Image (cartoon, rainbow, N blue to C red):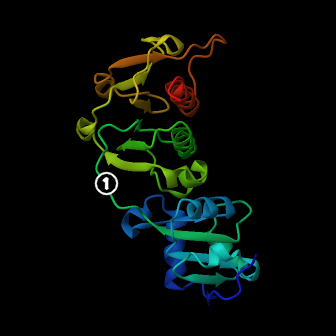
């Protein structure tokens, strides 16, 4: 069902200040920190945001899509704008640009929840890996994700796309130091290819905090020193190591076994 009554403001100049800000949000991975809001595009992410009760500060539509935009899109945003397809392409990070995008205010900063089931990201740098880990965290009930300094920007466009909407159901805290983790009151579990029991043989604590480390260096020695448990993922096929996002999915799933 398409919108019929919602108002939209047409913008046709690429030099419009609002479009300049949107381009910055798309092109600069950390611009959201200064601007206090982030950009998502495409039907899947926009629908996922609305399903979580978020109200966009701004909805942006391609001229061709606006007449058939769903009512729930047009009515949800505080402001709607319509732009030519060529300008939308400049805002898009997709090979085939979407025809709708939302600008959403960043959630307010919140303190670390001491008892929450948590994932710690220790300098995980690839946006695809970070987004994939966020999806696994949401799927397996780990609602708090703490990112240490050096981790890919959590609300950057690439991480948002890889997260596929997981952001909207998680509590995300970034830019942390090891000292900040003192607030956690749940056991820390670290994966290691060199020590610890096989994952399937461990009695995993619940809730706990899983630490996922840098793609090349793994979890730092200082963070490993805080571990209550070490877990090893068996690899009978003989590979030296697993991709960090794949390892995270295996470990977080293991933590849910017997909990539900």
Q: Position of residue 109 (x, y in %)?
A: 32, 57
Choose between 184 and 19: the one closer to the eye. 184
Picture coordinates of residue 206, whole percent (x, y): 41, 27
Task: Looking at this view, name the residue that lies furthest to the front.
Answer: 260
Dividing the picture into quadrants, the one containing residue 49 is bottom right
Number of marks drawn: 1
Q: Residue at x 67, y 59 (%)?
A: 44
Relative to 165, residue 208 above or below: above
Query: Would residue 150 be visible to someone looking at this image?
Result: no
54 relative position to 150: left or right: right
The answer to whether residue 51 is left or right of residue 203 is right
Q: Quadrant of the N terminus?
A: bottom right
Q: Is residue 34 left or right of residue 87?
A: left
- Give the image quarter of residue 5: bottom right
Whether 196 is drawn above or below 188: the answer is above
Q: Percent x, y for residue 218?
A: 44, 27
Q: Residue at x 61, y 76 (%)?
A: 60
Relative to 31, 86 lies left or right: right
Other residues around mark 1 within 10 Å, as few (<14) / some (14–19) / many (≥20): few
Rendered residue at 68%/63% (across/down) = 43
On the image, numbered disc 1 is attached to which residue?
110
- In the rendered image, residue 47, in percent from the top left (x then y), is placed at 63, 62
Report which quarter residue 214 is drawn in: top left
* SS type, badge 1: loop
């Amino acid at each position: 069902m398409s919108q019929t009554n919602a108002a939209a403001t047409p913008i046709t100049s690429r030099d419009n200040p609002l479009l300049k800000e949107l381009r910055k949000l798309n092109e600069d991975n950390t611009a959201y920190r200064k601007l206090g809001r982030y950009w998502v595009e495409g039907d899947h992410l926009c629908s996922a945001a609305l399903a979580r009760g978020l109200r966009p500060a701004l909805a942006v539509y391609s001229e061709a899509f606006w007449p058939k935009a769903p009512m729930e899109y047009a009515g949800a945003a505080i402001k709607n704008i319509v732009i030519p397809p060529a300008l939308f392409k400049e805002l898009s990070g997709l090979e085939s640009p979407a025809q709708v995008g939302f600008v959403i205010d960043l959630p307010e900063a919140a303190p670390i929840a001491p008892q929450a089931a948590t994932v710690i990201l220790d300098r995980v740098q690839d946006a695809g890996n970070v987004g994939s880990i966020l999806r696994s965290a949401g799927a397996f009930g780990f609602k708090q994700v703490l990112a240490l300094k050096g981790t890919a920007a959590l609300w950057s466009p690439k991480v948002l796309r890889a997260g596929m909407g997981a952001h909207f159901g998680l509590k995300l805290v970034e830019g942390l130091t090891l000292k900040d983790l003192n607030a956690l009151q749940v056991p820390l579990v670290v994966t290691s290819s060199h020590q610890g029991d096989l994952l399937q043989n461990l009695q995993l604590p619940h809730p706990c905090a899983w630490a996922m480390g840098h793609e090349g260096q793994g979890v730092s020695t200082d963070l490993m020193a805080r571990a209550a448990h070490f877990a090893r993922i068996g690899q009978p096929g003989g590979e030296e190591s697993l991709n960090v996002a794949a390892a995270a999915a295996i470990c977080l799933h293991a933590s849910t076994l017997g909990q539900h």
